[in-house]
Amino acid sequence: MATGAWPVSAQDSAALSPRNANYNIRVHLDPVQKTLEGSEVITWKNIQPVPARELQFHLYWNAWKNTRSTWLRENALRPSRESRLRPDSYAYCDVKTLVLLSEAKNPSDPPAGADLTAQMRFLSPDDGNPDDSTVMAVALPKPVAPGATIRLALNWKSQIPRTVARTGFRGNFFFLAQWFPKLGVFQSDGTWNCHQFHTHTEFFADYGVYDVQITAPAGWLLGATGISYGVTRNSGGTATHRFVQEDVHDFAWTTSPDYREATRRFEHPGLRPVDMRLLYQPEHASQVDRHFRATEAALRYYGTWYGGYPYGHITIVDPAYGSGAGGMEYPTLFTAGTRYLAPFGGGQPEGVTVHEAGHQFWYGIVGNNEFEHAWLDEGFNSFSDARTLETAYGPTAYMQRFFRGFFPVMLREISASRLLGSRMNDYRGVLRSDAQATPTFLYYPETASGITYSLTALWLGTLERTLGWATLQKIMSTHFERWKFKHPRPEDFFAVAGEVSGRDLTPFFDEVHRKAAVFDYAVESVASEEVKTTGYVQRNGKLVISEAKDLSSSGAPVQNVYETRVVVRRLGDGILPVEVLLKFRNGEEVRDIWDGKNTWKLYTVTRPAKLDYAAVDPARKLLLDTNYTNNSRRFEPQSDLPSVKWASKWMIWLQDFLQTLLFLA
């Protein structure tokens, strides 16, 4: 763990971000009572051109205060999840005092100022729920002028939940996220962006410097956002850990007596070296190198494709079994997730590790508003992690778990695209749920994931196959460079995409982002017949009846001429240009770009050979096509091909099943 001199202020090093929301926090963990008691001083600068007349805070853990909260009401709409909390999962964050500090004449003077505790009140800006207390507001004695800075002191106590939404405890394992009173984001129109906590949305905050002192049981390993600035042993069997991190918009930490620690160093030409620290469970010791290799893959490929990771350290957390804390991202720290039996190639821990490490870029460095436009990080990251995993590890193998998910059986003979695979299945389930342009917190809770993650990953994949990787990579790296340590909106990315590609991509984003459109293109019918002319024809200056083959102008028969007719259809309401291919038996091809605006189109072509097959989108550029099985049709079906294919797969599955039974015997 790195050590160094204690920083004095938010201006001690070259700032990468505005650093307008800075936190100095002291917190004490009681592992028996499962409580946190803390105090914090917030130094906040108004960087907007309008005055701020009040402050608004997130109190996230109040989402689990009682069943009347908005979070728990929305959670009941998600049948895939347990809607009721266990008795030990109820929690709260109770602010005891809030004081607006005056400037001390001497650093040693105790804090003093206006006590605003009586002015605190709860708001419900999203749904008007009077029983929700996840947003707290306080009016200020006088407005904070543009460019001015104020300091606040808060004292609070929280009851830690048994893990909900990947924060809380499981036995003596603690993972603490969104655990302190946290300012919302003040906007240029004079309003606060401070949404209630919703079951399917995450977070949004300004960048700053975090200086946090955590008191926990002595001897327990502790990991946190930032760099360790030492550990102080206290009386009573506790120790205080100090972590400091600049230019981040959040802070999370974890501790447990069961953790084991491993370290590595990431180095790659052109990128900043990164000290990697892994806190892992003892039973996962054999997977240590796999955690590091996956983290290195994310740092390398995201770094070279988009832009370098600016911090010199990162902490990987392997959460306790059954804790529910896996698969979550925080600045310079993330939780992975694995199992005791995790064969290489099955997705654990590599898949989740690459994804969560990738969030250091799309979320950590480019800080979009996850309440309103979560696809700007989750979708970008889903596309990027699939591409990283494909590049670093190759295609994924099919794996099925038996005995309540414990015993894995991997079929390496069956591989799948890391991008299409589960992403298409998730996308099919949300086709008509909501347009992606709808603010994320207003999505129907059960289908928010498919729109946020899968839809975005698929349309980014479509852009890659349409524009080429070089162009898409430049789009995303330009967006990264232009908006790092800022808060981009969808329009900002769309502008970059059009600028870099040199194309008007408005019609594309209209279809994939602004509409809840369904894309399904198909070959409706094919026909290929030898050309004959029946009826009256001109021959030797006379009109005569002909039932023979077509004749040339000289009257000689034309041999082996075939008329091919192909009907293609647009079965959904999503409209994007697609390629149509007609492939003939002599190897000749006819290609056309169909704009797809009409519901169908007839292609009539005369060639000296019969049609072999016809296909819509033969290169599969449109990854959003929901039914690719109808995209092609042969003139003469080869009925034996499917039977051979599936018989081979069933034989492979049967062989693996018998081998599994033999192992168990």
Image (tube, grey):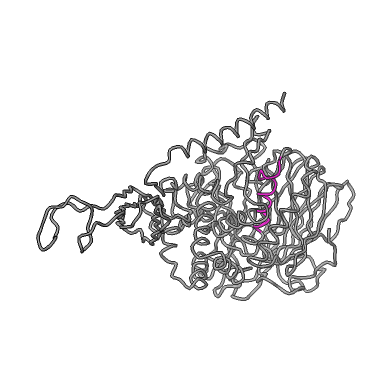
Percent x, y of residue 525 = 33, 47
In the rendered image, the residue lying farthest to the left is 542
Left or right: 418 in relation to 11: left
**Observer-nearest of 5 and 289:** 289
Of the pair 282 and 444, the residue shown nearer to us? 282
Q: Is residue 344 inside the magenta stretch?
A: yes
In the rendered structure, the answer to whether residue 441 lies left or right of residue 572 reads right
Q: Would residue 30 be found to the left or right of residue 595 on screen?
A: right
Q: Position of residue 161 (x, y in %)?
A: 67, 42
- In depth, the one of 653 and 152 nearer the eye is 653
Q: Quarter holding the C terminus?
A: top right
Quadrant in which residue 400 is drawn: top right
Where residue 52 sits, quadrant-wise, is bottom right
Residue 3 placement (x, y as % from top left): 85, 62
Residue at figure coordinates x 18%, y 50% from the top left: 547
Location of the N terminus (image quadrant): bottom right
For the question of whether residue 82 can be seen, the reply is yes
Residue at position x 69%, y 38% in the image: 322
Q: Quadrant of residue 550?
A: bottom left
Residue 159 appears in the picture as rendered: no
Looking at the picture, how far across and down is residue 463, in whole percent? Answer: 50, 62
* Most distant residue in the top direction: 665
Q: Which residues are magenta?
A: 342-359
Judge whether 640 appears above or below 309 on screen.
above
Number of labelled discs?
0
Decide: is 81 above or below 525: above
Task: Please name whichever residue, 202 or 507, is drawn nearer the observer in this view of the structure.
Answer: 507
Q: Is residue 559 magenta?
A: no
